[in-house]
Image (cartoon, helix red, strand yellow):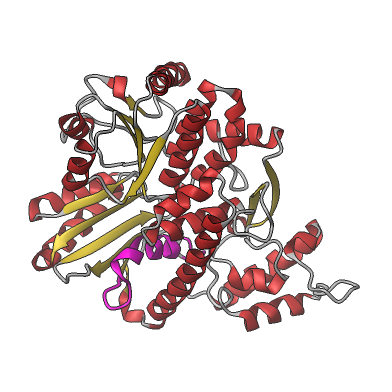
Amino acid sequence: MGKKNLYDRLAQFNERIESAVENENNIALVSSLNADGMCASGIASVYIFRLGGKCSVRTVSELTPETLAELESSGYDLFLIMDFGNTTASKLRNSLGTKWLLIDHESIVDGGEENPLKDQNDSLTSYGVDAEREISSGGLVYLLALEASNKNKDLSKLAVVSALAEKQDVGEKKSLVGLNSEIAKSSVSIGALSVKSGLLLAGETMPIHEAIAGNLSPYIDGLTWNYENSYSLVKKTGLQMRNLNGQWRRLTDLDHEEQGILAEAIIKFIVTNASSTLPVADDLTGSVYSLREDPQTSLRDARQYVELLNACGSSNKGGIGVGICMGDRNAILEEGERIFSAYKTSLQQIISRIFSEKWRFNDYGECLFVVGEGAVHETMINPVCSFLVGCLTLNNKLLLVRTITRDNSRYKFSMIRGFRSKFPPILGDLLKSCSESIGSVVTSGRLNSATCEIPLTNLDEFMVSIRSRIRYTRFEG
């Protein structure tokens, strides 16, 4: 299977959706609360509207039996289910009959034994294209929209955001590869996107020192959220911090040589202050993806766009995220920016506490376990885990963060694989194999990330199992 199979399936999916629109069917979009899922919903909404149809949108963290029962009784004629890594086709078939289409860039299986699908007419996946590196769920939906009309090419920028959300910038200089690269080039060709090499710091319209201090990814211990240190660092480089009119110079004002000077200063700061594995210069510079958006918003830098969507997801405000993806730049965007600001404040408080309490870290070399209870609310566990594994000194780790659920009945775990980690991308399967025998629920299982919940009484058993499996897998690999 390969691209031909993928495009054949795209044509089949588009035909069914066009038929539903022509017959005035009621269509519902259901996506995950991940940034990739919200982008997928945003693209699908615009695509269906442009076909002349209408649809409702719902974002949920997982497709629980309760959620599926609600969908079954909702009266919709067709459901587009997008970006649920641990959803099996049989589960949907049992609840929704034939009234659904499932889209996910990772493999879709028919049942719990990971059997290949018996009837793939209702499922769209990557079909031989590298699901980990080359295409996202949002990218698949974009290709579906493009199958309907080239007028949907303007949605390509959302497919780029989706790819970055899935950490698929794995090419040279942190660029997109494969189908993602083709989509990015298409977006550049219509002026919706620009790509250049530079510092991987968001906030291009902010003063240089504020951009450094306000940057979340990559997190730089001692500089992120520390405006005094960031100002001091820039000043010591000798770079001119104000222009001739006395205004603060911005990151976009720096030429290539000046960006190199700034990058070297940041690297020197990290090397001097790091207590663990030192980063490489490539983690600070790379391909900067800038969207055709107002530079005064958080949407100009595509990676910061991802962070804003993550904030909406962690706040259970997926509708706001989807609305932004659909193009609302008024009240919805204002609410999204407010959510993002509160999210960053919450994240700062959590991360500052975690780093100040060293007992929370259990470092086993390639794997890092973090005890989050008392500091990490369950709704923030995935953002915290993702944030930590993005740190320049931790991105070679397999990271596992735990906390306790709101009702104090279960432990919740979030596992993410750093992009430099040598551990294979099997995290969904890993948590599933370690947890099923002890009454655990895998709430999300992907290649590079997964979450689960276990009973409080089974913590020791679970930890022994997962440590053993990690050790075994690493040695086997």
Out of 7 and 47, give the one closest to the viewer: 47
In the rendering, at what x and y percent does residue 41 appear? Answer: 43, 40
Which residue is rendered at x = 37% and y = 35% of the image? 104
Asked whether 204 or 219 is in front, the reply is 204
Please state which of residues 358 and 176 is positioned toward the viewer in this rendering.
Answer: 176
Quarter of the image where one finds residue 112: top left
The C terminus - image quarter: top left
Estimate the x, y position of residue 38 in percent, counting from the top left: 43, 46
The percent coordinates of residue 425 (x first, y second) are 35, 44
At horizontal 38% and vertical 60% (from top left) the residue drawn is: 314
The quarter of the picture where residue 305 lies is bottom right
Q: In the image, 106: left or right of 464?
A: right
Is residue 7 located in the magenta-colored stretch of the structure? no
Is 84 placed above or below 232 here?
Answer: above
Residue 384 inside the magenta-drawn segment: yes
Residue 310 locus on image (x, y percent): 44, 57
Q: Would you say 432 lies left or right of 360 here?
A: left
Asked whether 399 or 330 is in front, the reply is: 330
228 lies above or below 101: below
- Magenta span of residues: 371-393
Classify 206 as above or below 470: below
Q: Is residue 437 left or right of residue 179?
A: left
Quadrant for the N terminus, please.
top left
Q: Residue at x 43, y 78 (%)?
A: 349
